[in-house]
Structure formats: structure tokens, C-alpha cells
Image (cartoon, coloured by chain):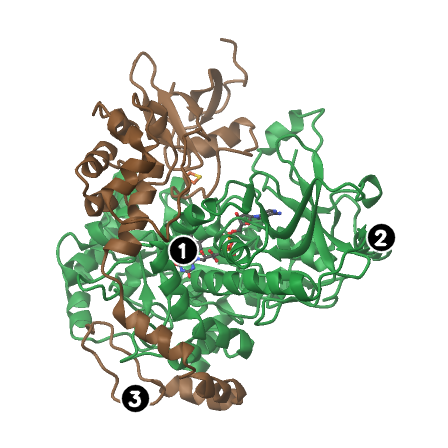
Amino acid sequence: MPNVQKETEADLIPIFIMGKRYLVPESLTIMKAIEYAGYQFIRGCGCRGGICGACSTVYRKAGDYKIYSGLACQTVVEPNMYLTQIPFFPALRREYDYETMEPVAESIYQLYPELFRCVACNACTKICPMDVQVLDYISALKRGDLEAATRISFDCIQCGLCASRCMGELPQYHIAQLARRLHGGKLAPRAEHLRQVVESIAAGKFADVMEELKALPVDELRKLYTERELEPAMSDEQWRPSNNAGL
Amino acid sequence: MPYPPKLKELIKVVESTRAERVDRKKRGEEVPFLSLDERKEMLDHHPDFKEEGRRPLKIGPSKGYAIAHEMADLLEARSRVDPDDIDLSNPDIDTDVLVIGGGGAGTSAAILAEENGARVTMVTKLRHGDANTMMAEGGIQAASKGEKDSPYYHYLDVMGGGHFTNIPELVEALVTYAPDAIHWLEKLGCNFSKHPDGRLHTIHGGGTSRKRMHYAADITGAEIMRTIRDEARNHRNIEVIEFLPAVELILNEHGQCAGAVLYNLETQEYMIARAKAVIMATGGSGRLHIQGFMTTNHYGATFDGIVMGYRAGVEVSFLHTVQYHPTGIVFPEQAEGILITEKFRGSGANLVNIEGKQFVNEREPRDVEAASIIKECTVKGLGVPTPTGKVGIWLDSPMIDMLSGEGTVRKEFPGKYILYKRFGIDISKEPMLIYPTLHYQNGGLAFRASSATSLPGLFLAGEVSGGVHGANRLMGNSLLDIVVFGRIAGKAATAYINDSAKEGDLTLDHVRRFNKEADEAGIPSDRVSPMLLPDYTPPKIKERQLTTHYVGTVR
Ligand SMILES: Cc1cc2nc3c(=O)[nH]c(=O)nc-3n(C[C@H](O)[C@H](O)[C@H](O)COP(=O)(O)OP(=O)(O)OC[C@H]3O[C@@H](n4cnc5c(N)ncnc54)[C@H](O)[C@@H]3O)c2cc1C
Ligand code: FES
């Protein structure tokens, strides 16, 4: 393979972007290396911070048959890595009516019967760039444990690599999303204190106080601000302010 | 890459003072907060106050207002397209509400608009959810605990944080609708961190008087974004089109906002969307790299919405202040700019200099905190030099395990723990090296508490707007802002369609007028905006792109 760039600079290492060789500084992330090579991203780049799932990348190392994965924005290049990004995967997401859906495993089974096509091969977990135990949450769902599925899938960034490797063609990340929502909004105990506050505000409890505050000249506001009581850093749920004005 | 030997040596200094600092923390002894006057003095070291960093705008509705050069360059620039080349008579998309931007603000707005009866089209530059919202870690504020907190205290904190410059009616809306915003998210299935009885976990953030920061582990924004994105996808009358940024607003003959010119990033076609109302939710501008600072922001944070709105006659406000997050990673270089959430400090980690000494309270407002770090490094010379020639300050994360038990760092900050682990650094045992990083656009287009702007038919939500946070935003109030004002905008846009929107011929005359103003002011004609994508192509490569045509930064 002929050189695309001249090998003049020190500390440059070869990487193969979709099979084509480029020399890039060894300290760069895959994302910065692709830019260094001369690409301008449209797809395959989002948050640049390891959380949006736009930049999932699969690669191989020289002479090694194994397929590795990583986020381009988080993974540092290695000499002779062969890489490609998979910025999109066409997994099926099913529409549903969240409001009326029962928070039980059967709701999920009805929407995603392919869940049971899982053969527990673990390819999903192996490819996950976030080290999410994908198979474990799929197994939890087969058992009907939405809480465990929520917990295990929590770091999922929905990049779709799991689905791309799945023998049973499951859209794992869509299924996990559904499980988390059913858990968060319908299974986990709701915050009673929140509901009370929402009600009292809706009933207009603070309307007058707000009008007064808005009308205050800056120096008076500043005084209230400076004198406001601060909850201590190490307080617990039992802490109460010494003065109830403003509550 | 792990800490090299030189830094390992310096870490020993931090370790030597750690036990004592932990004891002090346990006793509740803190570095005193600065008084309001001292804060003011400290802010002289903030990049906002560098006179050479900004200049007055030469044209447009806020002519004369001095803002960062990088922003002024874009606001004064010409349109990407010649209005004469565009045929407005045959729109490609015809909708009720056009939402521009698929972050948290745009998505909340789309859901509410649809629930109120509108057909919604959301166009977004990257993928739906590739947005600053996804990146928020720390939390979202709301006075949800009535026995110790209320909108009253939240209001005071927001105003104090913004140096009392915030627009009162906007703050009132923010704090009053805050609990309902959390309630909405909870109902939609967001997994906020909770006690077993359902009581929400809340902690302090910089500038809060009560612990009212709610969170979902350390991926609060992602949990919110993926939940509401999932909800939006269930709504039949919301159509989302990705990689189709807006580049110009379209008005109608009655002077109402009535659509946008769109650009397909992949096929490079321009398209026309006609709408009865438009909600602008394009977010922030970290990718302008003001004064050369690194940034925490996503790839598409390029100021586009402000450019479009400004050209259509909407004033800008509070853009003279930009938020630098006090704690961005400076080492290892691969992670440069990435944010280390304030929650680390909220959970007890000290900021210490090269001598292992504390120099500022960890819970000052962000601008004060950032200015203190810059001062410590530049004026006092007590920063820690990195192998790549930068300086930083230690954020002493191992304290958290000592204060709250072994394993806390790992459990409460899984995202950052893994990130550093990949570089061979265990942040529950070794501190992090940080420096301020460009984080949040405090200002934006001017708007009212109803989310309406001076341009009928144009509504705003989120980071693109200005005034809610005044001159400085507190952590946790922006996620709140996008949900509160996103929901308001969705409702307001539908109400406007029913009450005031009129049919009429479409026009881009405002763009022609703006281009003419730029000609007359002698603005160089090769400057175009909105920017759409930043350009990180090395100069060496550009020299060889002999037949490549760049329009602004985009090929
Ligand atoms: C790393 C990080 C951590 C943060 N942590 C917190 C926190 O803990 N608490 C808190 O309250 N706030 C936090 N913030 C701030 C907060 O996340 C953002 O201010 C907020 O989410 C912005 O939401 P938005 O919807 O206005 O913009 P975004 O979420 O950025 O969405 C904007 C959308 O508009 C799209 N867009 C841009 N230009 C165009 C165009 N021309 N046409 C069409 N679409 C376009 C973008 O692609 C994107 O989808 C954090 C921000 C960052 C970057
Ligand atoms: S760009 Fe978002 S995860 Fe890499």
C-alpha cells in the first residue's frame, strides 16, 4: 500500500481508516486522528465526550483476528489499527403509548417478542464500548426483572453496536430504553414531596411572594441574598432552616 | 496516559495535606466565601473582562454592543446563500410548528406543541440528541423539598449567581415551574437518584443555599435526553429530520416568522420549510473557542440560532459574558476540555495548588471559581505544569472516598471513573488536573417569559436565549431552563398559531437588507454564517486541497 502522506515527522504512527493508511500522532484519540488525516465529520461525531453514541468504532489490530470496539472520541489510536466507524444502525424501534402501558415484563415481550431469540452468545456484551453487560440485562428482562435491567443498562449510550452483532437480531438498546422508562416512571416509588410542592405552587402559594421579589430594588435583593441561610455542606435530609420565611 | 513521574511527585504534595483537609471538611470548616466586593475584584481575572477580547457590533439590531470577536465575526457575516437563488414558492416541508434543534429544549417543545394539537417538524443538525443536553452530568435544580426550600430561595440564588442582572420575569418562570418540570420528567420515566421511599436525592451546587440539585447518577442530561427523545418518537405528529440544519429564518409578508431555509449536510441541497410558528432551540457556542479556550460543548455548538435570529431582527442580550466551567480536564491531553462536574466539589473534593494548599471555597459561583483558578495559575504562578505545556490545578477526588466511604467515587461518578481508568488513572486514589474550559453561553437572543421574541411567530427555548441566567448561570439551572422554557415554547407556539398566525407570501427580504447593511459597513465579504460545523482540518492538509471550496468552515 503506497504512502498517502510522507513519513517525515517523528512520533507519527500508521493507522488504517477504512483500509487506507494514514500517519497520525500517537497521542490522539481516533476522532482527532481522523480529523488530523483530513476528514471533516458530518456523521460519526457528536458530543466528543463519550456519552452520545455517535462515534462508535470497530477495529482490528495487525495480525489479530479479534474485533475490538471503542468510542472514537475516547479511544487513543494504536499503531496499525484497522478501523471503521458505524455511525448508524437500522435496528427496529417500536412505537408505544407510554401513558397506558403496564410496567410489567409482558408489555416488553409483546412489543419486542424477538427478545426470546437471544441465544446468550454474549457478542453484545463483548462489543459494547461502554462495558455495559448487555446480555445480563437481556437475561434480567427474560426473568421479568425491570429493576435489574434498568440498573445494568444505565450507562448505555444507544450507539447500536450490540444490535449490529446480535445473532437474534434484537434491538437491545431500544428494549433497555423501554425498560428504564417503565421502571423510572411507574415502578420506582414516586417522590411524594415533589408532588406536594407542585400542588402548592399550582394553587398559587408563592404568587404574591414572587411579585414582591420581582419588584425589589437590587440593593434590597442583595441584602436578602447575603443574609439567606445556607444549608451546611454535610447536612442530611433532617436539616431544617432556623427561619421559615420564604417557605 | 497515566501521570508521568514528575506529576506523581507533585501528587505526593497533595497527599501530604489531604488528611488534614478531610478533617476540616468533616468539622464543617470551610475556606470562607468571598464577599460580594471581593467577588467583584476576583472577576477582574475572568476572560470576560479582557477588553481586547471583544468589540462593538457594527450592524444589526444590537449595533454598538461589545461582544467576543468570535461571536461578532459571525453576527456581522453574510448569509450562506443568496436569497435571489432561492425559490420560496414551493416549500419542501409544510408544517404547523418548525422546531430548529434536537436537544432538550427542542424536544420538550416538540412534545408540548404536539400535545397541544400541532403538527411538528423538528430539524436538527446532527442526530436527534447529539447536543449539549446529552452531556450534562451534574444535575437539575428545583425547590422540590418544601420543608426547607421554595421558589423564593431558588429565586435569590439564581439572581445572586447572575450578579442581579437577570431579567426578573424570566427567573420567576424558571423557579416557579421548576418542580413541575422535574415532576414531568419523573412521570415520563427518568430515573432520578432516589432514596428507597422515593424521596429524591439532592445536593448542593455552586451558589445554592439549599440542596436542590437532582441527578441521575452522573449522566443526568443523558437520562433526561434519552427519555424525552424516546417519548418524542412515540408521538405520531412529530417528524424528526436529522442532518438538516437551518441556515436562515423565513418571514411572511405580514412580518411574521414563517419557516426556515434548510441545508442537507449530506446531499448539499437547500430546502424550504414553511411553518406557522418557529421554535429556535439550537443551543450554545462552545465550538467558537473564544479566546482560544478549550470547550466542553458538543460538535454542533456553533452559535447558529443566534445568527439566524439576529438577521431577522431579534436583539441579543448578555452575550458579553461567557461561562467558563472551572473544572475541565487539562491532562491527559486526549480528554482535554472534557468537563468534570461540579458534583465532585459538591461531594467534598478540594481544589488545591501545586503546594497542596486550598485557595478558594469549592462552592463559589462558577465565574468566581474560574477566575480564582486562572489567577492562581497566571498571577500567583502556583499552578501545576502539565507535560504538554499547560497549567492546571488539582481537584482532590480521593477525599470523597475518605469522607463518604470507600467506593463512593466509583459509584457516584462511574462515567469519569471509567474514562480515567482507560488512561491508567484511578481517580479514587489520585487527584485530577483541571483548568477552566469554555462551557456555556450565558446570553443569547432576547425573549420574554412567554418564550416569545420581538419577531412574531418566533419562540425560543434553551441555551440560545439570553436573560434567564443574567451574567452567570448556576449549575443545574440550564437543564431546568430547557425543560421549563421548552414546554412553555411548545404551548405558546400552538396558541399563537390559533390566535395570530396569518397566511401570506414568504420572503427573505430581511436577509437582503442585512447583507446590504454588511456591505455598507465594509464587512469583508468572505465571512459567512451560520457556521454549522467547526473546522479542525490541519492547515497542512488545507494547503493541498487545491480544488476544495470552503463556505465559511464547511467544505
Ligand atoms: C459537558 C456539559 C455539562 C453540563 N452540565 C450541566 C449540568 O449538570 N446541569 C445543567 O443544568 N446544565 C448543564 N450543562 C448545560 C446544559 O446541558 C445545556 O445548556 C443545555 O442542555 C442546552 O440545551 P439546548 O436544548 O438549549 O441545546 P442543546 O442540547 O445543545 O441542543 C441544541 C440542538 O440544536 C442543534 N442545532 C444547532 N445548530 C442547528 C441548526 N443550525 N439547525 C438545526 N439544528 C441545530 C444541535 O445539533 C442540537 O441538537 C452542561 C453542558 C455541557 C456541555
Ligand atoms: S462523539 Fe459522542 S460518544 Fe463520541
Which quadrant would residue B314 be assigned to in this image? bottom right
Q: A237 and A231: which one is in front? A: A237
Q: Amino acid at mark 3?
A: Asn
Tell me the SS state at disc 3: loop
Q: Amino acid at mark 1?
A: Tyr
Q: Which chain does tag 3 point to?
A: A
Which quadrant would residue B461 be assigned to in this image? bottom right
- The percent position of residue A8, horizontal first and vertical second, equals 51, 20
Circle number at residue B332: none
Crowding at label 2, few (<14), some or many (≥20) Cα neighbours within 10 Å? some
- On screen, B155 above or below B406? below
Alpha carbon distance from label 3 to label 1: 39 Å
User: Would you say residue B247 is visible in this rendering?
Assistant: yes
Drawing shade for chain B: green
Name the mark nearer the viewer: 3 or 1.
3
Q: Which residue is mark 3?
A: A244
Name the mark nearer the viewer: 2 or 3.
3
Residue lying at the far left of the rendered structure: B406
- The percent position of residue A116, horizontal first and vertical second, equals 24, 28
Circle number at residue B435: 1
Q: Amino acid at mark 2?
A: Asp
- The percent position of residue B251, horizontal first and vertical second, equals 76, 55
Q: Which residue is mark 2?
A: B519
- On screen, B249 above or below B498? above
- The percent position of residue A40, horizontal first and vertical second, equals 57, 32
Q: Residue at x 19, y 67 (%)?
A: B21
Q: A206 and B115: which one is in front? A: B115
